Image: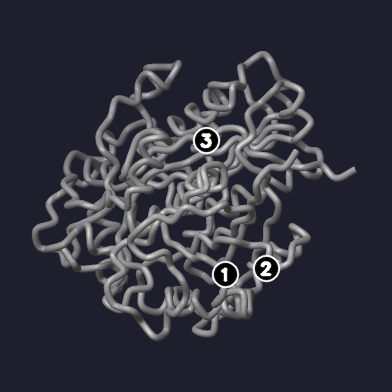
């Protein structure tokens, strides 16, 4: 018997909002969360803008208040998102089998905020002043591990690191774990906090970032002819995946069904995607095969859509290769990154939360900053205004440096 997987809880903190409802409200209105980054002196940098999470009090979300003060932002964001998702799902510790509940949360870079801060301490004050908590604060695997420790989740627990595909790989692996019977509940998603001087310098020096500093909210413009690079962001999102019968037995609210997962590698270049979209197209086809769905069954593609010249053109080609005539006739394509920027290893998860609400509420959020059409990007990107549409099935793309591609399919839950 095939085990079906459904989504029963959502949580997120990102540049637009600190709750799922506020996030959805602002997405539907086409608002931007991009602004000047103020965490370090960037006056001489080519890029000074980003999707910075607003400061907030994370302490109420932690049981161990002392430990909460010894965590990198990436761990904090993930813990808050996962705690929101757990609350939203109605799951209560002690009322499910802890050995059948696990966590997979992806990240692109782990605790780089702590890495840079403690290295500065070392250089200025000597090695003896480096925090004894430095190592667990920077280790990527502590992102899911800490949430498991606080909530006694004894099932599968690991971190996926595949650059900007990390969250999609994490969610896909959680899906497969439940399907094969290794868990009934999985907390899945992604978290990254990379708005540091070092990471900005690295991406800036490779000319990957937008330099539209005079217009922060107009800087992330996926598929627009004037796009000049991505806008780096931070944040986290976590979803609760649950085996269908387990969810039904406890009367859980179900957002959607997790239908398919596909992956591939471009095997082409360490940073550039295949111009013809062949690798990305394979990931999408593999997801369709996993879901046992025809391409025409997909109503909406949530694009990786980073606002880079090569990436957006290549993804457009990949969508055409995968969907054929359907791509130009009825398929909608949009990019959440136009409003929240690119949260790297967290991106796919933050975007998946938006897709859950699109399926439930019948609204497709826009791709903002669509001002000038690009002949290399000629699909329906839902320009500037949300559209009301019953969405039955969605496909979500995430692609990472190294040629990592991961595509997910979610569909309206029909019982």
Q: Where's residue 192, x and y in %?
A: 41, 47
As rendered, which of 26 and 216 lies closer to the eye?
26
Marked residue nearer the N-terminal end (3 or 1): 3
Q: Nearer the viewer, mark 3 or mark 1?
A: 1
- Determine which quarter of the picture holds residue 356: top right
Q: Would you name the residue on which mark 1 appears?
A: 330
Residue beneath the point at 49% across and 64% down: 303
**C-beta proximity under 8 Å, tags 3 and 2:** no
Q: Where's residue 213, x and y in %?
A: 15, 63
Q: Secondary structure at mark 1?
A: loop
As rendered, which of 14 and 149 lies closer to the eye?
14
Residue beneath the point at 69% across and 15% down: 95
Marked residue nearer the N-terminal end (1 or 2): 2
**C-beta proximity under 8 Å, tags 1 and 2:** yes
On screen, residue 58 versus residue 346, left or right, reads left
On residue 296, the disc is 2
Q: Is residue 340 above or below residue 360?
A: below
Q: Where's residue 65, x and y in %?
A: 38, 17
Q: Where's residue 134, x and y in %?
A: 37, 36
- Find the distance from the CA under tag 3 to the CA under tag 2: 28 Å
State the colouring used for the structure image.
Answer: one colour
Q: Would you name the residue on which mark 3 appears?
A: 10
């Amino acid at each position: 018997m095939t085990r079906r997987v459904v989504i029963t809880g959502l949580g997120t903190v990102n540049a637009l909002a600190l709750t799922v409802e506020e996030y959805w409200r602002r997405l539907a209105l086409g608002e931007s969360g991009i602004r000047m980054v103020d965490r370090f002196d960037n006056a001489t940098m080519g890029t000074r803008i980003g999707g910075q999470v607003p400061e907030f009090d994370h302490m109420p979300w932690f049981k161990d208040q002392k430990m909460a003060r010894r965590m990198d932002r990436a761990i904090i964001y993930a813990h808050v998102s996962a705690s929101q998702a757990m609350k939203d799902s109605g799951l209560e510790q002690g009322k499910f089998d802890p050995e059948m509940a696990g966590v997979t949360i992806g990240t692109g870079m782990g605790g780089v905020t702590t890495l840079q801060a403690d290295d500065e301490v070392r250089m200025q004050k000597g090695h003896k002043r480096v925090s004894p908590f430095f190592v667990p604060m920077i280790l990527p695997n502590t992102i899911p591990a800490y949430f498991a420790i606080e909530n006694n989740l004894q099932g599968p627990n690991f971190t996926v690191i595949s650059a900007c595909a990390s969250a999609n790989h994490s969610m896909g692996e959680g899906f497969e774990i439940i399907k094969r019977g290794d868990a009934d509940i999985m907390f899945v998603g992604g978290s990254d906090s990379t708005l540091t001087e070092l990471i900005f310098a690295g991406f800036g020096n490779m000319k990957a970032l937008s330099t539209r500093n005079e217009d922060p909210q107009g800087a992330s413009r996926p598929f627009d002819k004037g796009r000049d690079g991505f806008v780096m962001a931070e944040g986290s999102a976590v979803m609760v995946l649950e085996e269908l019968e387990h969810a039904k037995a406890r009367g859980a609210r179900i957002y959607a069904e997790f239908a398919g997962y596909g992956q591939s590698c471009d095997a082409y270049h360490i940073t550039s995607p295949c111009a013809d979209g062949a690798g990305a197209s394979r990931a999408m086809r593999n997801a369709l095969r996993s879901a046992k769905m025809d391409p025409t069954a997909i109503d909406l593609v949530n694009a990786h859509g980073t606002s880079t010249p090569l990436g957006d053109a290549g993804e457009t080609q990949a969508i055409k290769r995968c969907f054929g005539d359907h791509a130009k006739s009825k398929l909608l394509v949009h990019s959440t990154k136009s409003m929240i920027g690119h949260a790297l290893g967290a991106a796919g998860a933050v975007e998946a939360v938006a897709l859950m609400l699109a399926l439930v509420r019948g609204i497709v959020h826009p791709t903002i900053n669509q001002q000038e059409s690009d002949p290399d990007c000629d699909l329906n990107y839902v320009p500037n205004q949300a559209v009301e549409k019953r969405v039955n099935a969605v496909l979500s793309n995430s692609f990472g440096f190294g040629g990592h591609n991961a595509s997910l399919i979610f569909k309206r839950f029909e019982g």
